[in-house]
Amino acid sequence: MTAILDKVEQEALNLPREERAFLADRLLSSLGGEVLSDVDTAWVAEAERRYGEYQAGRRQPIPAADVFAEADRLLG
């Protein structure tokens, strides 16, 4: 492994879980796989905006159990 690749890997592994997942998706997409549609790109931008609000303390987290219960209520 080259020194720069080793450094990038170490930096990436130190990212929070969500940012590592986002980076992994971007890297995999760059290999010529599926390209994000305009809708997917808009959702990524929205997710990044909301995550930024959460990090800045302007948005409170919602427990997953609450989200799924609300989805079940709306769909059921």
Image (spheres, rainbow, N blue to C red):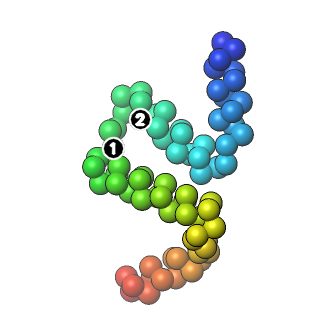
Vertical position of residue 71 compared to residue 23: above or below: below
In the displayed structure image, the side of residue 59 where residue 36 appears, left or right: left
Dots 2, 1 in contact, CB < 8 A: yes
Give, as a three-letter code, the residue at label 1. Answer: Leu
- Residue at x 37% of width, y 82% of height: 75
Mark 2 crowd level (few <14, some 14–19, many ≥20, 10 Å Cα): few
> Is residue 40 visible to us here?
yes
Q: Which quadrant holds the C terminus?
A: bottom left
- Disc 1 target residue: 36
Q: Is 51 in front, or is 71? A: 51
- Residue at x 52% of width, y 76% of height: 67
In the displayed structure image, the side of residue 34 where residue 17 appears, left or right: right
Which mark, residue 29?
Answer: 2
In the displayed structure image, the side of residue 31 where residue 11 appears, left or right: right
User: What is the x, y in percent for residue 58?
Assistant: 58, 70
User: What is the x, y in percent for residue 24?
Assistant: 53, 38
